[in-house]
Image (cartoon, rainbow, N blue to C red):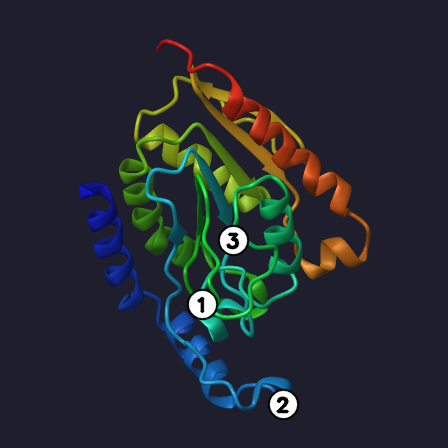
Amino acid sequence: MTTAIEICSLQETIITCKKCPRLVRWREKIAKEKVARFKDWDYWGKPVPSFGDPNARLLVVGLAPAAHGANRTGRMFTSDKSGSLLYPTLHKFSFANQPASFTRDDGLKLNDCYITAVVRCAPPQNKPAPKELANCHPYLLDELRLLSSLRVIVGLGKVAFDAIFRSLKELEMTPLKTKPAFGHGVIVPVAPSLFLLGSYHPSQQNTFTGKLTESMFSDVFREAKKLLEKPVASS
């Protein structure tokens, strides 16, 4: 219960964050101007909170909210192209109660899974600046401290993968000295019972070009499920 309250408090803090002037201007501009297909939506237009099971053993880490996805709906990967692959996959492996997400109050619940991102505001061209990554970094550190049951972390894309490893190093949660190379399907034992998995990001660009297929994405979460089924190793 204490962890859930602390996580909720952290998300409330994130929602009010204005550390990055460029991102504040961009997310609010998008929310005001909208696009024709979403002209009737009341855009979220604020930093997007993480969500999921506070006792989760699986953590999924993305890059940042999409301008007309989570920046519109207010929930990570909700009603965007990336979510149209992520949520069916999570449902397939019993990490979500339904295979689709459309709004932040559509009944979606995560099971043994928590979703966050390296940056909480939609960045222009989906490219946060180094300073913006640094500004958001403490929130990721706080989440890793609070999610004490974690055993598997999936980094969606190189930026997320690298940010997670750096965070684990800062928190002294891994004895590894050298940053592992990112790759799709890579599995890194970062501690006796903690694994870091790499996956190409389920972005529209990656799925449309065939760089990431549904089968490839499923393979990552199949491995995550297998790792969670293994007995906890002694430290």
Q: Looking at this view, is 102 or 44 the one in front?
A: 102
**Label 1: how many residues lie within 10 Å, few (<14), some (14-19) or many (20+)?**
some
Q: Amino acid at mark 1?
A: Arg
Mark 1–mark 3 distance (CA, rounded to whole Å): 19 Å
Q: Looking at this view, is 123 or 57 the one in front?
A: 57
Q: Which residue is mark 3?
A: 63
**Does 54 appear above or below 8?**
above
**Does 58 appear above or below 226?**
below
Taking the spot 46% from the left edge, 62% from the top edge, the residue there is 107
**Where does residue 53 sit, x and y in percent of width and height?**
38, 45
> Mark 1 or mark 3, which is nearer to you?
1
Q: Amino acid at mark 3?
A: Leu
Quadrant placement of the C terminus:
top left
Q: Say whether disc 3 or disc 2 marks the residue closer to the N-terminus.
A: 2
Q: Which residue is mark 1?
A: 104
Horizontally, is 50 left or right of 61 in the view? left
Q: Amino acid at mark 2?
A: Ala
**Does 26 appear above or below 56?**
below
**Where does residue 234 sit, x and y in percent of width and height?**
37, 9
Q: What kind of element bears circle 3?
A: loop
Q: Say whether disc 1 or disc 3 marks the residue closer to the N-terminus.
A: 3
Taking the spot 60% from the left edge, 35% from the top edge, the residue there is 198
Taking the spot 64% from the left edge, 32% from the top edge, the residue there is 222
> Mark 2 or mark 1, which is nearer to you?
1
